[in-house]
């Protein structure tokens, strides 16, 4: 009896020793792969070879600018792998703090969204760590965001994106989200929660979605072409409306325009708020283009697309007009301020935006603009657009909305309708950018600066130098570190420097 008791004690001690040696990961929650061996190979070597082959054959078109979001399909790799690779090929050489993958719920009804609360997601290529900090922030952001394990356990929409991410990015943190009802309310709800949870992190948003389901080949091409055109316009609410309109036509066998309609709209909505200015479709195909075991089926097909949402490189602006004179009369300035004020009122009161009819050719010129909102001297929002691609009066209205609702510094403390009487609007109409070689070319108090290095960029308006009293070196160094997220001395290490001037005017302090 003593021998048996001793044996149990030894085994118990050994068990405790093994647990202590394994450390914290022994208690980690891991979401195992659900579709390895069916949607993609379950052998690590075979999976890695397949993904790398897709990537090697992907389009080489390079996106110049900061990538914010991707659209990638989620069917079996034999059908959509080459299309997905065109999206992920754009990530080579880029880094992100987190990758947020949003997919639709195929197996369980969800009214809102479920965020995967496991410590790791497992694929044949290894474990992917989940960013539990963002996960917890999302779960507390809105009652419609929960953790519903059943929504993830069989779901492939997030899982099939991971091997591509593992091959292209290596180590990264994941935020896995399964979305249910694709209503505009739910898209806004999830987008709001994401923007607040993301904070200052540099994230990649991935919308996991296939396109049209089950029409014939020709109908799929027509429907998907229309949907992609709306996606390229970076208009999430228009995308929801377009889907309803297409489905109302009674196209034979058409089940949906995007099985991940909610995720795509949410990613577009969030990417836009994080600074994305453009969307580019990289590749389109459907299952009728794929030969499987010597056969193709074009009677019932599923569409696939790769697209990227990015913050365009505004340095493509032509510089030959940098020295031209530009002036506004007091009447023209008043018109732009009135447009901004009416826009701000309607935006905060959630009223229909007015349709401004401006015929003045000067105000219809295409110029960059910044709109700054202050409350008794305190900054409450400042956002602008450099590229001269929009009529001045329209861009003033657009940037007013952006300054009031999209400045990430105030997502936790947004402007309210009660502040309207105290808000003062300032408009800065920008000249084209001019590249400089030496910081001594900067005219303090006259020139604004734009610093760019790699995918990071930032700017200070001309009036910042006057307001702060900084030296020329401080002006540049602070722009590098505080606005572009670069080292303070990046301007000495290859960062590109540009200057521009601004015609600045504002409402009177006492209205």
Image (cartoon, rainbow, N blue to C red):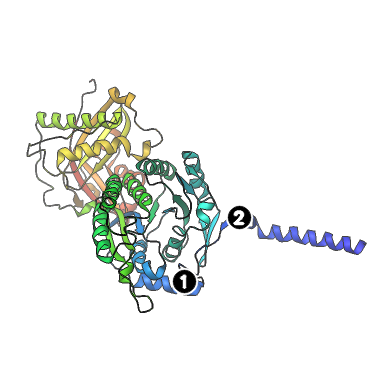
The image quadrant of residue 224 is bottom left
- Classify residue 22 as left or right of residue 487: right
User: Residue 25, image x and y in percent?
Assistant: 62, 57
What crowding class fits label 2: few (fewer than 14 Cα within 10 Å), some (14-19), or many (20 or more)? few
Q: How many numbered dots are placed on residues in this image?
A: 2
Viewer-side residue, 367 vs 355: 355
- Classify residue 114 as left or right of residue 395: right
User: Residue 294, image x and y in percent?
Assistant: 35, 79
Viewer-side residue, 440 vs 259: 259
What crowding class fits label 1: few (fewer than 14 Cα within 10 Å), some (14-19), or many (20 or more)? many
- Classify residue 361 as left or right of residue 116: left
Return the residue at label 2: 28
Return the residue at label 1: 47
User: Residue 390, image x and y in percent?
Assistant: 17, 45
Residue at position x 30%, y 66% in the image = 285
- Closer to the N terminus: mark 1 or mark 2? 2
Q: Quarter of the image containing the N terminus?
A: bottom right
User: Residue 108, image x and y in percent?
Assistant: 48, 51
Q: Is residue 491 visible?
A: yes
- Is label 2 in a helix, a strand or a loop? loop
Q: Quarter of the image containing the C terminus?
A: top left
- Depicted 357 relative to depicted 212: above or below: above
* Of the two numbered discs 1 and 2 in the rendering, the one whose residue sits closer to the viewer: 1
């Amino acid at each position: 009896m003593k021998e048996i008791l001793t044996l149990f004690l030894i085994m118990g001690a050994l068990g405790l020793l093994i647990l202590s040696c394994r450390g914290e990961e022994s208690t980690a929650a891991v979401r195992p792969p659900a579709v390895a061996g069916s949607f993609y190979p379950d052998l690590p070597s075979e999976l890695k070879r397949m993904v790398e082959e897709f990537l090697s054959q992907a389009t080489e078109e390079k996106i110049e600018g900061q990538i914010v979001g991707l659209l990638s399909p989620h069917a079996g790799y034999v059908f959509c792998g080459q299309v997905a690779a065109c999206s992920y090929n754009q990530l080579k050489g880029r880094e992100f703090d987190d990758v947020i993958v949003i997919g639709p719920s195929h197996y369980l009804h969800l009214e809102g969204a479920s965020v995967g609360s496991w410590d790791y997601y497992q694929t044949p290529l290894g474990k992917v760590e989940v960013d539990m900090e963002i996960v917890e922030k999302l779960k507390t952001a809105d009652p419609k965001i929960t953790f519903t394990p059943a929504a993830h356990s069989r779901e492939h929409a997030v899982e099939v994106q991971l091997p591509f991410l593992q091959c292209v990015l290596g180590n990264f943190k994941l935020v896995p989200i399964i979305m249910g009802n694709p209503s505009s309310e739910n898209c806004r709800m999830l987008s709001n929660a994401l923007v607040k949870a993301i904070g200052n992190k540099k994230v990649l948003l991935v919308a996991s979605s296939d396109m049209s389901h089950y029409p014939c080949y020709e109908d799929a091409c027509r429907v998907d072409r229309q949907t992609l055109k709306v996606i390229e316009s970076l208009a999430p609410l228009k995308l929801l409306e377009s889907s309803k309109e297409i489905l109302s036509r009674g196209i034979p066998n058409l089940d949906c325009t995007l099985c991940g309609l909610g995720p795509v709209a949410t990613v577009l909505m969030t990417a836009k708020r994080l600074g994305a200015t453009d969307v580019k479709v990289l590749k389109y195909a459907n299952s009728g283009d794929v030969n499987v075991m010597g056969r193709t089926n074009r009677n019932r097909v599923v569409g696939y697309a790769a697209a990227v949402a990015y913050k365009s490189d505004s340095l493509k602006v032509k510089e030959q007009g940098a020295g031209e004179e530009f002036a506004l009369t007091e009447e023209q300035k008043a018109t732009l301020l009135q447009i901004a004020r009416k826009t701000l009122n309607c935006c905060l009161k959630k009223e229909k935006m007015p349709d401004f009819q401006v015929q003045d050719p000067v105000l219809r010129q295409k110029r960059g603009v910044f709109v700054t909102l202050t409350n008794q001297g305190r900054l409450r929002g400042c956002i602008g657009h450099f590229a001269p691609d929009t009529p001045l009066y329209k861009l003033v209205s657009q940037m007013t909305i952006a300054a009031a609702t999209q400045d990430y510094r105030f997502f936790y403390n947004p402007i309210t309708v009660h502040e309207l009487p105290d808000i003062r609007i300032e408009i800065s109409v920008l000249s084209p950018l001019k590249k400089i070689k030496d910081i001594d070319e900067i005219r303090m108090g006259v020139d604004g600066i734009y610093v760019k290095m790699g995918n990071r960029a930032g700017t200070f308006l001309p009036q910042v130098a006057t307001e702060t009293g900084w030296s020329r070196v401080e002006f540049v160094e602070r722009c590098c570190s505080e606005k572009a997220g670069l080292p303070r001395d990046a301007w000495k290490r290859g960062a590109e420097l540009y200057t521009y001037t601004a015609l600045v005017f504002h409402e009177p302090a006492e209205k």
